[in-house]
Amino acid sequence: MTDPTGPELPARPPRETPRSGRSGGKGTLAVVTIVHGRHEHLERQLWGLRQQRRLPDAHVIVAMDDSRVETVAREHAGSWEVHVAAMGRRNGGHLPLAAARNLGVDVAAAAGADRVVLLDVDCIPSAGLLERYAGVLRSDEDNSPDVPDPGVVGSPVVLAGEVAYLPPMPPGRDYRDLGLAALTGLAPPHPARPVLGADETRPAQDLRLFWSLSFALTVPSWRAVGGFDEGYVGYGGEDTDFGQRVGAAGGRLLWVGGALAHHQHHPTASPPVQHVHDIVANANRFAERWGWWPMEGWLEAFAAQGLACRSADGSWRTSSAPSTGGGVSGRRPPC
């Protein structure tokens, strides 16, 4: 259990000096971040990016219904190119998370990037994250023996680094007070993902574990997968769908050690009742396509709270909305 007073804080270290150069390796690397609100989280992500051992060549920020994002992105950027794209809400005010990621990669590719790292706005990259992702992508392209299970030449490869969840900071303090290197000791590894050595990679056996907090791939791999399905609107399901699309395209997911991202703490609910309408609609879409239910724990928790139930055809619906269709049967009786 986390101490409610927060971690013990050392004295504030000297301000880190931004790294001065980019890797001379093959290809150009862009970071893609989608943002709505979370301006301080974006500032901290940019603080981490400025300290990368391998700086990005470009940072693409997709601002979803948020005109302030561009100011934050440009004021706190490093020496890389900054591209800001704007996107409004869709379908009754929902944030288009899947479509925003697709737009971000399109902008990055148009700017000349051939490798992309998609980093959630809540994530602060450790100093070696971009260098490690870039190195593994290059090794895979070169069919290096350092990359296990090389698979079919030309098949898509998606890299996923470790994400550790930071505890909340005490009032008035900031993660930046600690220094980037000190964040590594604040959070344990995620229990549902493998813990790897800094130079280790491992093929994922379960594509359901893919998440979009931190991952990397080449633009050709992105195109082979087809990006995210923009039929998923709002929160939930689009990550699990992307993992299935990787498999359907004959691709692989590789866990990558040495590419740690620190997830900044923010208040949330469990289950995420604020997203119940999005999760129910997206779960139905997923089940229609793949024949099984994602996010079952959340759906069952919504049902227990009277927020969602099963329709006669087996699909889920929220308690205040008509059935959204479906047809995949389940054990819970219809409501």
Image (cartoon, rainbow, N blue to C red):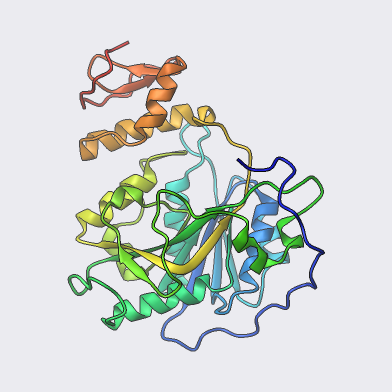
Q: What number of labels is visible?
A: 0
**Where does the image place residue 11, in percent across and percent down from the top left?**
82, 64
Quadrant in the picture for residue 52: bottom right
Name the residue rendered at 55%, 79% in the picture. 54
Q: Is residue 182 above or below residue 7?
A: below
Of residues 28 and 107, the one drawn nearer to the viewer in this rendering: 28
Name the residue rendered at 45%, 87% in the picture. 25
The answer to whether residue 96 is left or right of residue 334 is right
The answer to whether residue 6 is left or right of residue 291 is right
**Where does the image place residue 330, in percent across and percent down from the top left?**
23, 23
In the displayed image of the protein, which residue is found farthest to the bottom? 24
Q: Is residue 217 above or below residue 313?
A: below
**Residue 70 visible in the displayed image:** no
Of residues 277 and 185, the one drawn nearer to the viewer in this rendering: 185
Name the residue rendered at 26%, 72% in the picture. 148
**Where does the image place residue 164, in percent across and percent down from the top left?**
53, 55
Name the residue rendered at 54%, 77% in the picture. 57
**Where does the image place residue 155, in percent across and percent down from the top left?**
22, 68
The answer to whether residue 195 is left or right of residue 38 is left
Question: In the picture, which quadrant includes the C terminus?
Answer: top left
Quadrant in the picture for residue 232: top left
**Residue 150 visible in the displayed image:** yes
Of residues 240 and 227, the one drawn nearer to the viewer in this rendering: 240
The answer to whether residue 121 is left or right of residue 153 is right
Question: In the picture, which quadrant includes the N terminus?
Answer: top right
In the displayed image of the protein, which residue is found farthest to the left? 152
In the displayed image of the protein, which residue is found farthest to the top? 335
